[in-house]
Amino acid sequence: MDSKADRQDLDRSGNSGQPHSGKALPDWMEQVADGIYCVDCDYVQPRLACAYIMVNDQGRAAFVETNTSLAVDRLLEALEDIGLSRDSVDWIIPTHVHLDHAGGAGALLERCSNATVLAHPRAARHLIDPARLIESSMQVYGEELFKKLYGEIVPCDESKVRTMEDGASLSWSNRQFEFLHTRGHANHHFCIYEKTANGVFTGDSFGIGYPDLQKHGPFLFASSTPTDFDPAAAHESVDRILNTGCNKVFLTHFGRFDDLGEARGQLHRSLDFLEQLLNDSIESLGAGQATSQTEEDSLKNRMLKFWTDQLTGNGFESSEALKERLKMDASLNASGIVFAAGRALKKATREG
Ligand SMILES: [Zn+2]
């Protein structure tokens, strides 16, 4: 569990020297560590996806994640609520280019004139020229839903995008970042270890842990959304994050998470399960026993059962509402697995 000392630090820091004006924060924003704020971007529903504002001892600010263009007004309001101006933003750091993480990067950059975007080398070109990203998302969601979810994707000015290699570090006054390329969820994903907080901003590399599903005990599950799911790499990424020696993580979905011992076990079990699903899909699709659609439906149901069994074991009542709560994630994970199975089969044919 999180150390008590940490929480006490946090309580103290609430009344001490931070730029935070002392004014009560809105209910969609929370201080989660000394100088670190979690902003609920209200993406799809409340407390599903967040972005973080990190402040250093010079009163300079950094965003980790931007959510979509539609969240940018709120992010700027959050900055104002802690007494900082747009000009004080030095860094905008999306963990990867999936649109609930980086969709707002260009729009935010336009409005923070001193900011530089720090990006994974494979993410940078999509941030600078989002055409392909937009096209592939529109194929998945259709134009109408795409617009509703993401608004307009603004390209990032190339001269303001800096790429960070694996293992690169960056000093920022009292804070120190280390960038870890973490494959498994997306090939353009990195995590940011921040030494002073002793925490890692994990994007989608350390599972999804919604606050409303934690009330009877920790509950994290791995994400296998399209198109780069790779279970072996994802296992490695989880270990790499823990090997930083961090004592907390900052999840994009959603918030600070402290029980890292429990997380390690749950995430590896969750990835083992997804790997089993992937192998089963490769077999049934390969043998022509299933179509992509029937396979996705069956995976979705198996995933829902795996999660609800775990949650009812924790003390949740088994209900349709609980399944309904997890349906979207089950669908996204299932389609990522079918996609990965298709890719594995194509590769086998080419090599066969
Ligand atoms: Zn993602």
Image (cartoon, helix red, strand yellow):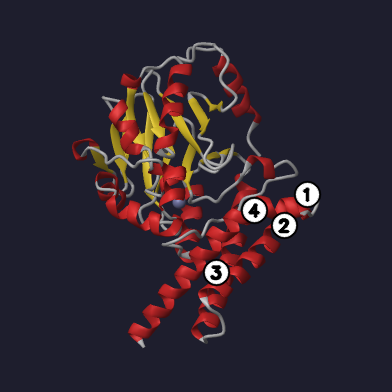
Where residue 322 appears, as percent x and y from the top left, is 72, 51
**Residue at which label 4 appears:** 326
Q: Alpha carbon of mark 2 to alpha carbon of mark 1: how far?
A: 8 Å
Q: Is residue 65 left or right of residue 120?
A: right
Foreground label between 1 and 3: 1
Q: What residue do we see at 33% from left, 53% from top? A: 133
Q: Which residue is mark 2?
A: 308
> What amino acid type is highlighted by mark number 2?
Thr
At label 3, the amino acid type is Glu
- Residue that lies at the very extreme toward the left in this rendered image: 159
Q: Position of residue 195 (x, y in %)?
A: 43, 34
Q: Which mark is residue 275?
A: 3
Q: Residue at x 51, y 67 (%)?
A: 337
Which of discs 3 and 2 lies nearer the camera? The answer is: 2
* 88 in relation to 127, above or below: above
Q: Residue at x 49, y 84 (%)?
A: 286
Q: Measure how far apart labels 4 and 2 are at the Cα level.
A: 9 Å
Q: Amino acid at mark 4?
A: Leu
> Residue visible at 63% across and 43% down?
259
Say if mark 4 contacts mark 2, CB within 8 Å: yes
Quadrant of the image containing the N terminus: top right
In-front residue for pair 345/33: 345
Q: Are marks 2 and 1 in contact (CB under 8 Å)?
A: yes
